[in-house]
Image: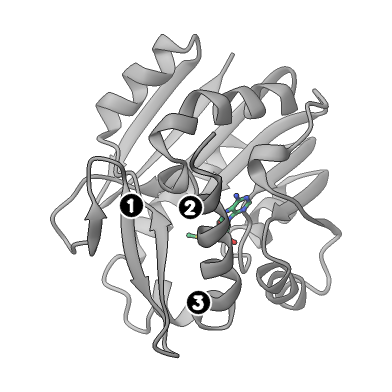
Amino acid sequence: MTDRALLDEQIAYYRARAAEYDVTSMPEGDPYAAHGNAVREALRAFEPRGRVLEIAAGTGQWTGLLAELADELVATDASPEMLEINRAKHPDRDVRYEVVDAFGLAPSHAFDAVFFGFFLSHVPPGRFDAFWGVVDGLLAPGGRVFFVDEGRHFEWREDWIDEAAGIVRRPLADGTVHRAVKVLWRPADLEARLTELGWDASVHSEGPFYWGTVSS
Ligand SMILES: C[S@@+](CC[C@H](N)C(=O)[O-])C[C@H]1O[C@@H](n2cnc3c(N)ncnc32)[C@H](O)[C@@H]1O
């Protein structure tokens, strides 16, 4: 695939952003906090029990809730810096951390639930089917998926390099500028695409976000 360089840049960007991620993604007085809380309620209602895998866990904005609900939790991310912050936030939680590229997660058919927050929008259009193939390979029979992300909205704008290809420019506090992937799905389009891939999918709008559940 020709997008490997872009994916590597995206990983480097998040490794460099780890220390400033929480402040920038959930600023004090976050006007979207109520939407985030509504998604947390939906995740609780989904009941991710048994063996749970979190893809691209980042600094752990969802890991604590997952750890509360799961019997066993494996939190993965390509950035060791992100996972260090995550681990430090959850010292009393029994979470196994693994630094691994989401696209390289080996099929284990071991997990009752797979979760990813704000990662689907970082999957390039050309990798969408392959990514869901990876997810399929992780699920035990009867396994389910819950995801949340930013949808297509007019609340703020990305600095697009190529909107159709889903490539954006992202600056960091140190003045460096990085390329990353950003694909803003409309919930109905995402649900239709997942259905085409053979999943039983349900995707819901929540302010500028969407959340969805999927099972095979
Ligand atoms: C927008 S953050 C979301 C973090 C967390 N899930 C949350 O909701 O706060 C995207 C995360 O994806 C991770 N990431 C980026 N590319 C990745 C890849 N190819 N494989 C695994 N993780 C990746 C980044 O390190 C970062 O932690």
Q: Residue at x 37, y 30 (%)?
A: 203
Residue 174 placement, left or right of 82: left
Q: Is residue 101 left or right of residue 151?
A: right
Q: Earlier in the sequence, mark 3 or mark 2?
A: 2
The residue that appears at 42% across and 58% down in the rendered structure is 180
Q: Are marks 1 and 2 in contact (CB under 8 Å)?
A: yes
Amino acid tagged 2: Leu
Which residue has dot 3 on it?
Answer: 22
Give the residue type that dot 3 points to: Asp
Q: Is any atom of residue 104 visible in this view? A: yes
Spatial CA distance of label 1 from label 2 is: 9 Å
* Above-or-below relation of 143 to 150: above
Task: Find out if the beta carbon at label 3 lies less than 8 Å from the nearest ligand 1 atom.
Answer: no
Q: Is mark 1 within 8 Å of ligand 1?
A: no
Q: Quadrant of ligand 1?
A: bottom right
Residue tagged 2: 6
For the C terminus, the image quarter is top right
Where residue 194 sits in the image (x, y, percent)? Answer: 43, 19
Of badges 3 and 1, nearer the viewer stands 1
